[in-house]
């Protein structure tokens, strides 16, 4: 069987998938590209994924998967010994799915939408105001996750893929410091994930300043 090829970029959502790949010890090659920069890498990415987003995963059979949550659920199917997605008979599964999807469908897009206000025809004079309003809304969305988070991981003793999102996304706007201040339980979860030996080097490489 040939390897997975994970197309990603430093500090991006592809890191969430990298953590999952590492956890199941999947054989994969990481192709880091400047995904927004016009050029051959972006042209190739757009051929594989019409949204031009990372993560984009080339499967061992050559087919393509996108959407981090879908990729994570696929890895759980492909590596049945994994523990980061509760099985269908596990009472923690409904809560896991709810918050996995909440983070993906409610929170993640707020980052994507605020990355480049110009894309949405927000004038330069209003772009900071626009970014700030979205940042504030994002923190309100995270507060709902904080409210139901357990300890030491989101689901309690069991490490899950929800923790991978928390450990990566706390570095995104408005930044790790603001995240830690507003969301102490989630910040502790992220610290706990970052200390796990299998993830330490991946997170350090992607977030060297933290
Ligand atoms: N729903 C996608 C979102 C991926 C996404 O937005 N990735 C960002 C980088 S972290 C991106 O590629 N943004 C560029 C764009 O949306 O144009 C997923 O979960 O994989």
Image (cartoon, rainbow, N blue to C red):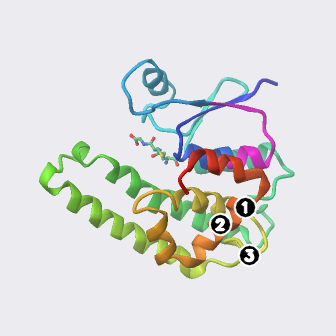
Decide whether residue 23 is among the magenta residues: yes
Could you tell me which secondary element the residue under label 2 belongs to? helix
Residue of label 2: 191
Question: Is residue 70 visible to the viewer in this orientation of the structure?
Answer: no
Regarding mark 1 in the picture, which secondary structure is present there? helix
Mark 3 vs mark 2: in front: 2
Front of the two marks 1 and 3: 1
Give the left or right position of residue 201, taking residue 90 as reference.
Answer: left
- The residue sitting at 41% across, 59% down in the picture is 173
Q: Quadrant of the rendered structure where residue 5 is?
A: top right
Residue numbers of the magenta segment: 19-30
* C-alpha distance separating marks 1 and 2: 6 Å
> Mark 1 sits on what residue?
195
Give coordinates of residue 38: x percent, y percent.
Answer: 36, 24
Q: Nearer the viewer, residue 120 or 16?
A: 16
Q: Residue at x 44, y 70 (%)?
A: 178
- The mark nearer the N terminus, 1 or 3, is 3
Farthest residue to the right: give it: 81
Label 3 vs 2, first from the N-terminus: 3
Which mark, by number, is residue 156?
3
Let me know if residue 206 is in the magenta part. no
Check contact, mark 1 vs mark 2: CB within 8 A.
yes
- Pick the residue in front: 15 or 72: 15
């Amino acid at each position: 069987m040939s390897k997975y090829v994970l197309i990603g970029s430093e500090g991006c959502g592809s890191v969430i998938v990298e953590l999952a790949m590492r956890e199941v010890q999947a054989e994969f090659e990481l192709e880091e590209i400047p995904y927004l920069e016009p050029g051959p890498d972006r042209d190739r990415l757009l051929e594989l994924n019409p949204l031009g987003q990372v993560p984009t995963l080339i499967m061992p059979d050559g087919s393509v998967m996108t959407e981090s949550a879908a990729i994570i659920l696929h890895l759980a199917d492909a590596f049945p010994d994994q523990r980061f997605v509760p099985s269908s008979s596990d009472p923690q599964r409904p809560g896991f799915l709810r918050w996995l999807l909440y983070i993906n469908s409610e929170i993640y897009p707020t980052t994507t939408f605020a990355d480049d206000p110009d894309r949405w025809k927000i004038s330069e004079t209003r772009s900071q105001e626009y970014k700030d309003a979205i940042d504030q809304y994002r923190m309100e969305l995270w507060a709902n996750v904080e409210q139901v988070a357990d300890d030491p991981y989101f689901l309690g003793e069991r490490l899950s893929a929800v923790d991978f999102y928390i450990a990566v996304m706390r570095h995104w706007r408005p930044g790790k410091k603001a995240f830690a201040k507003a969301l102490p339980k989630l910040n502790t979860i992220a610290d706990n994930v970052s200390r796990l030996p299998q993830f330490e080097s991946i997170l350090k490489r992607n977030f060297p300043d933290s």
